[in-house]
Image: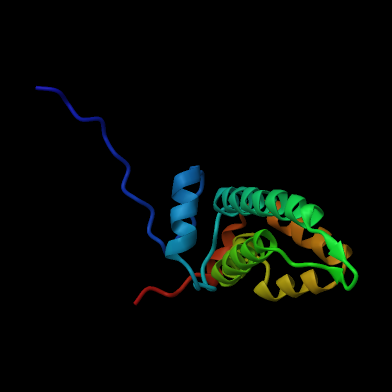
Amino acid sequence: MTAHPPTTPPVSLSQPYYGATFPIAVKRFWQKYATFSGRASRSEYWWWSLVSGIVGAIVLSIYIPSLLAARTGGYGLQINTGIVIVLVVGLLWFLATVVPTLALLLRRLHDANLSGWFCLLGLIPTAGWLFILIFTLLPSNRAGARFDQPAA
């Protein structure tokens, strides 16, 4: 008879998952689709950022060559089927991920004990995104637990 190795209980969705692996972070991203309260660990945030960046790079790597391959006529750029398909796929990806990405950003700010309103800094060109980058790199702060949902 073989002994089973001890397993750690899964982390509740109401708590940040520190040290989340790639598949766990992506799964939690979709499970907490529009959850703006609570906290998210750095690993949860950055694994999703990697997935989002890779998908964006793939879409752009298909879009740009198809755009360059499009012929220009007497009336400007002629839209071909490839461009339309890539634009539709890109739009669908954006619509599917914009809300959970904002929710994840807010939860990451909460974990650093910052207000979610700091996400509005993203509206400031360049400097705003730099501040958000710095804030998402900050370590977790225990005081951020104030953003957790109170136990029922």
Q: Quadrant of residue 121?
A: bottom right
Residue at 73 percent of width and 54 percent of height: 66
Q: Residue furthest top?
A: 1
Q: Nearer the viewer, residue 115 or 74?
A: 74
Check the image and report above or below for 7 versus 60: above
Is residue 77 visible to us here?
A: yes
Residue at 49 percent of width and 72 percent of height: 35
Q: Nearer the viewer, residue 93 or 61?
A: 61
Q: Residue furthest right?
A: 74
Is residue 20 visible to us here?
A: no
- In the rendered structure, the answer to whether residue 73 lies left or right of residue 108 reads right
Q: Nearer the viewer, residue 134 or 53?
A: 53
In this figure, what is the number of numbered marks? 0
Q: Residue furthest front?
A: 74
Q: Give coordinates of residue 79: x percent, y percent.
A: 74, 67
Check the image and report above or below for 66 versus 113: above
Residue at 44 percent of width and 55 percent of height: 27
